[in-house]
Structures are given as C-alpha cells and as structure tokens.
Amino acid sequence: MAGSSTRDIKRKIRSVNSTMQITKAMEMVATAKLKRARDRMDITKPYFETVTEAVQDILGADNSIRTRYIASDKAIKKTLFIVITSDRGLCGGYNVNAVKKTLESVQDKSKAKFLVIGRKAYDAFARGGFDVVDTFLNISESPEHIHALQIAKIALKLFNDGEVDAIQLVYTRFASTISQVATSLQVLPIERPEVKSIKDEAPVDFVEYEPSPEAVLHFIVPKYLESTIYGGLIESAASEQAARRVAMESASDNAEEIIAELVLSFNQARQAAITQEITEIVGGAEALK
Amino acid sequence: MGNKFKLEVVTPDRNFFSGETDMMIARTTEGDIGILYDHEPLVAPLKIGSLRIRQEDETFLLAANSTGFLTVTEELVTVVVDSAEWVEEIDLDRAIRAKERAEKRIMEGHEKGEATKIDMLRAEAALKRAINRIRLKEHNKNI
C-alpha cells in the first residue's frame, strides 16, 4: 500500500518538474524577446512622437482647416476597432484585457466593425459573431512597418468610403516590465488640440503649407494613421513578451512551491512505510516467541 | 558657412540624422526645396528623392528617401520619411534586382488588367524607389 503511494507522489513530482522546466525556458525566451522588443520600441518612439507632434501642431496652429479627418460635432455612427493581441497564449491577462477593453467601448454590436491582429483577437471576435472585416495573423510578435502600412490602407479605405466614421485602436501600452495597460485610442477623426486663444499668445505663427493646407493634411493623415498603428503594434509586442515573462515567472514559482509540498508528503509517506515495516517485523518476531 | 539650424530626420526603424547644418535640400511634391537658417514655418509633403545635408566642410551628405513630410518651425526642422539610407549604404545590386522585379510585375499586371490595380501602384512605387537609389548611387560612385 505505502509503496504505491510513494510511487504516485514521485510521479507527480516528476510531472510538475517537467512543467517547471518548460515554464522556466519560456520565461527565459520571453526575457530575451522582451529585450529585443524594448530596443525596437526605443528606436521607433522618436518617429511615432514626431509624427503625432507634427499633426497636432498643424491642427493646433490653424483651426480654419476643416475636413472629415478632424473631430466635429457630428455624431459617430459606426466605429472600426483595430484590436492588437498575440497569436499565442500563456501570457497572463494580456489578450483577455485587450478584448475586454474593446468590448467596453462597443455599445452596439451592429454598429462596430473589427480589424483584428493576432489569433486570440480573431478567435474572440469571429466566434462572438462580430463583424470582422480583416484579420492579420502571425505578425504581432515582430511587426514590420509594411504591416502597419497594409492595416492603415484598409482602415483608411473604410473611412474614406464612409463605411465607418471613426477608428479606434486598441493596444496594450507598455507602462513597465511588470505593468501593461490595455488602452483604447481614437485615431480618426483626430481630436483637435485645445487651440490657444489668440489674446494669450500674440503673434500667432503663420505656417505655410505647400501646396495647400488641405493637400498637406490629406497627405499627412494616412502617415499619422500608419505611424500610430505601427507604434501600437511595436508597443503591444513588447507588452506581450513582458506579460508572458511575468506569467511564466509566477508559474515557475508555483511549480517550485508544489514540488516542495510534494517532497514533504513523499518523505512523510516513505517514513510511514518504514515505520510500518519495522512494526510488522517486530510484531512478527514477537509472535514467534 | 552660414548660421546653423537643428535638423532631425526620423524613419520608423531608426533615428536617421540628428544634428546641425546650415543648408538642407529635399524634394517636395512641388519640387526641390532648400532650407536655410531662419526659414519661415512650413509643412510640405516629400516625394521619393534625395536629401542633401551640408556639412562643416561644405560637402553634402547624400541620402535616398521615400515619401514622407517636412516641417519647419522656429527651433527645429523635422523630416519624417518611411525609409532613408545614406548613399554609402545603398546596395546597388539589390536595387537593380528590385527594379527588374518591379518592372516584371508591372508588365504582368498590364496583361491581367484592372483587377490588380493596388498591386500595380505598389509595384510602381517600388520601381520609383529602386530607380531613385540606382540613380543616386551611380551619380556618386566616388563616395
């Protein structure tokens, strides 16, 4: 009896141990990938910030420009959600949070379209009966600029054709290696920054646009969309690795704890078996007397 | 050398150039434009072309760029482009191969007709980029 129970425990220890080896390896892989993703994020950040700043500057400096790219009082009817998640699981709440964040902003299922990046988002939205216009798989781990171009092109086409009148980007902001926040960002129409009143800041800079403000804006808005999506992709990739690293770290810690407990009960069972055997031998010897 | 201004050239994959110069020439959709110190505030889209940045010794740094835009403010001139590379970095063989590939695609596209319109635009853009690189490299072989 006792022999089989120690064998069971031993088998359990071995199985937990091999799981721990996997989670440890995944943790190390995620750490290495996280480093690479963060390096890329540092490189792309200046670009991302420069484009955003330029667009804000143009809109802030000149409020005579009126296009449908700029937020107005007109109510938004249909929204396109661009949702960035990963292709693979085992990364804690990373995917769930992004999907939840999206659903928070969806008021009416019939008035929302989805452009999903990553298998997890595809599974969540396609199965839920949402209107998924396009899917990008296998790019979320190492996104390239060309992917952002393609996504932006599809999104902009929907916007220009009047299929949607707002574009929301849902990505996971990389706050730190231990904290990632799912964020929803309105990309189009662009919120006009607070225009400083002319009295406060005279004289207002006169900015020249070649060939015309509208032409420049029509050129820059797609660039703005591209760079925002690219920035979101890069940041989400870093967040994914960070989330996975943390998840795998706690999994490894848990496995270690379980092993410690199992070793303890293994030792107890073994000791109990030995004690019982001695008792039996002693009992048998007594009986022969 | 005249007064200098701060110039930044950024692309998605790197901070291409960051420093001071007294003259920068870029190709906008309206034609080449030269920026000197104290240029009036300006925003202009850029075409596929070359960037020229004058250095201390009066020679120019040359770079091939794809589309983007240029902003001039009082303190800073910013060039944002999809891609850029210095003349020294251009891989001539690769550019020639890209040119042939794009040409082939355009030829095939013409046979197929309307259906491949977006692919055609893409191939044309690729062809323009390749030609731009080749031309820039050939003109500056001594570098």
Image: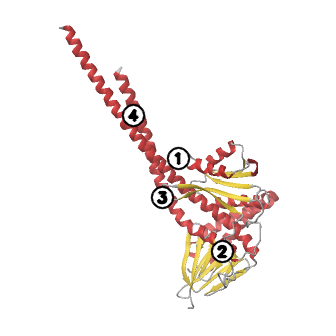
Q: Marks 4 and 3, Cα distance to the nearest angstrom?
A: 33 Å
* Disc marking residue A57: 2
Q: Residues within 10 Å of mark 4 (few under 14, many from 20)?
A: many
Q: Secondary structure at mark 2?
A: helix
Q: Which residue is mark 1?
A: A92
Q: Which residue is mark 4?
A: A13
Task: Please report, as a chain letter, where disc 3 is located.
Answer: A
Nearer to us of marks 2 and 3 is 2
Q: Residues within 10 Å of mark 3 (few under 14, many from 20)?
A: some
- Residues at marks 4 and 3 touching, judged by CB atoms closer than 8 Å: no
Counting residues from the start of the chain, the first of labels 2 and 3 encountered is 3
* Disc marking residue B89: none
Q: Quadrant of residue B91?
A: bottom right
Please check whether the numbered discs 4 and 1 fall on a single chain: yes
Q: Secondary structure at mark 3?
A: helix
Counting residues from the start of the chain, the first of labels 4 and 1 encountered is 4
Residue type of the residue flagged with mark 1: Gly
Residue A237: percent from the left, percent from the top?
A: 56, 56
Q: Marks 1 and 3, Cα distance to the nearest angstrom?
A: 19 Å
Task: Please report, as a chain letter, where disc 1 is located.
Answer: A
Q: Marks 2 and 3, Cα distance to the nearest angstrom?
A: 33 Å
Q: Which residue is mark 3?
A: A35
Residue type of the residue flagged with mark 2: Asp
